[in-house]
Image: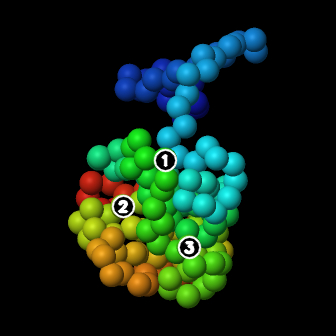
Amino acid sequence: MRDKDLFDNDDSFSLFIVVIPIDARWLQNGKTVAGGNGRGDATNQLYWPHGLFVDDDQTMTIADYGNNRIVQWKMGDTNGQVVAGGKGQGNRLDQWDRPTDVIIDKDTDSLIICDWGNQRVVRWSRRSGTTQGEILINDIYCYGLFMDDQRY
């Protein structure tokens, strides 16, 4: 089958091409919702943030790659809260080595974290008193995560 046949016979296929002129201008009305106070490790700063998960209540959970921590920011707050890690770079189950992504598993009330430098995916309970995570997948260079409604 030729590409032409595939595209000509498939009524469900749509191809959209967006052309952006080289001299396009954008309105500058963005709003900083986390960080914005330079690079650093204070609770109002981030250092190379990577993955971002926004919960139903607009709380952002951020994989703060350069600070080896997971931070949550409630909408409108000027400071985040470290919810996992933040104990220096390392390979213990309460430390991260350059986390790249984070999602929330609502069924288990847990964070699922890509711990890139330690080559693992870790589950971290959001219940108070959690002191360490549980390795879900080991020996993997994880960079991104996704979970659908069926938890796949």
Left or right for 141, reference 62: right
Q: Which residue is mark 3?
A: 86
Q: Secondary structure at mark 3?
A: loop
Q: Give the residue at x 38% y 22%.
A: 11
Question: Is 90 displayed left or right of 81 in the figure?
Answer: right
The numbered mark at residue 104 is 2
User: Where 85 sits versus 58, above or below?
Assistant: below
Q: Position of residue 56 (x, y in %)?
A: 29, 47
* Total numbered labels: 3
Q: Is residue 45 left or right of residue 76?
A: right
How many residues crowd mark 2 within 10 Å: few (<14), some (14–19), many (20+)? many
Which dot marks residue 78? 1
Above or below, 60 relative to 76: below
In space, the residues marked 2 and 1 are separated at their CA atoms by: 22 Å
Q: Quadrant of residue 63?
A: bottom right
- Where is the N terminus found, in terms of image quarters? top right
Question: Residue at 61% across / 54% down in the picture?
Answer: 45
Residue 89 can be seen, yes or no = yes
Check contact, mark 3 vs mark 1: CB within 8 A.
no
The disc, 3 or 1, on the residue closer to the chain's N-terminal end is 1
Q: Which residue lies at the image location 65% right of the left edge and 78% below the top edge?
A: 89
Q: Report if residue 101 is visible in the image.
A: no
- What residue lies at 50% left-to-right and 41% top-to-bottom? 33
| Circle 1: residue type | Thr
